[in-house]
Amino acid sequence: MPKLKAVFAGSIALLLLVCTTVDARSLAIQRFDASIGVDTDGSINVEERIVVQFTGSWTGIYRTIPVDYRTPQALKYSLRLSIDSIKNQFGDDLKFEATRERSYRKIKIWVPGAQDSTHTVYIRYHVANALRFFDEHDELYWNVTGDEWDVPIASASATILLPPGATGLRGTAFRGAHGSTERNEVAIAPHMVRVSTAALAFREGLTAVVGWNPGVVYRPNGLERWVETLRSNWQLAAPVVAVVLMGGLWLIRGRDPQPGPITTLYEPPQDMSPAEAGALIGQAATRYAAWRTNHQLNTFFCFFLAALLGFIAFYACWPCCWPRPVPPCTHSPSACWSGISVPPATRLPQV
């Protein structure tokens, strides 16, 4: 009994130690502020300011940006995102590594001295095709924070700056988990829309939607939109590429050569008998078989017609015609054929 109590007490102590160790290492996002500038060429420049509080020893953080979306036509639309720089609060460049994971661009950022301290990370990147264009307005649909954070965000905000001359400015915002329709307050000023929200829980995010009248930002033409669609959905170009490649191959090596002079040869090819050569020329063997069958039928019908007209008569030798198991015929061939006679002085009409 004392041993059992000692084991139980040791287990409780080990569990408390593990819980204390886990609680001693944590990460929290104190602020997430984004500034998004819309250029007249249809691209955007984004600067994110992320204030991170590290408790315990850490290597850095991950920033996961959604870059793949679905259009109403069920096609994929991929953002062309390029990272300009990643710096700390002192302006020093931070080491980072960007990879593609599912529908996201995942950025691994090394933060030196991330142990029981607070650091600010500045991420600047450029997106060439972030805008969407409709008949009545242009639109920016932007997931500000992303929804892949494994830690809560205490505060988040976004400021969208439009080019001078933008009119008909309107906007809305959503907060919550992926697919959430919970609305968030939006402040609209001349050439600017600001969105802010309180705490976001685990895997929750903030999304801003801003629209304005056409005419300020360059709109891609039909060809540019088609090229952009093919860039995101390269599988659509596979049949076209296959047709072009196979067509070129057919032109180079597949089509029949141009006809030249034809020389008549009166001898069969080497190591080939005349019968074999004749069978190869125009499927002569098949034609001969068909001719032989037709010739036999013609001969039969000639005899049949002559018998109907009474020019010839047939007499059956029945013992020869019974099928087995009747005993075989003992008559001689001359006796079997003796029953067939031609009426005297009978001649077939000339055809």
Image (cartoon, helix red, strand yellow):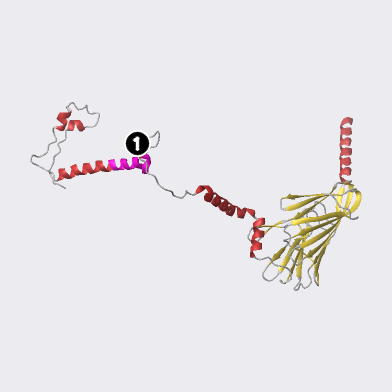
- Residue 128, given in percent of the width and then of the height, sits at 74, 60
Q: Looking at the figure, which quarter contains the N terminus?
A: top right
The residue where tag 1 is placed is 274
- Residue 283, given in percent of the width and then of the height, sits at 36, 42
* Frontmost residue, 61 versus 286: 286
Q: Which residues are magenta?
A: 279-292
In the visual, does 69 lie left or right of 116? left
Q: Quadrant of residue 265?
A: top left
Element type where label 1 sits in the image: helix
In the visual, does 44 lie left or right of 121? left
Amino acid carrying mark 1 in the image: Pro
Q: Quadrant of residue 40?
A: bottom right
Asked if the stretch drawn in magenta spans residue 284, the answer is yes
* Frontmost residue, 268 versus 250: 268
Q: Is residue 327 above or below residue 293?
A: above
- Residue 136, given in percent of the width and then of the height, sits at 68, 71
Residue shown at 52% from the left, 47% from the top: 253
Asked if the stretch drawn in magenta spans residue 227, the answer is no
Q: Is residue 350 above or below residue 120?
A: above
- Residue 291, given in percent of the width and then of the height, sits at 29, 43
* Frontmost residue, 250 versus 266: 266
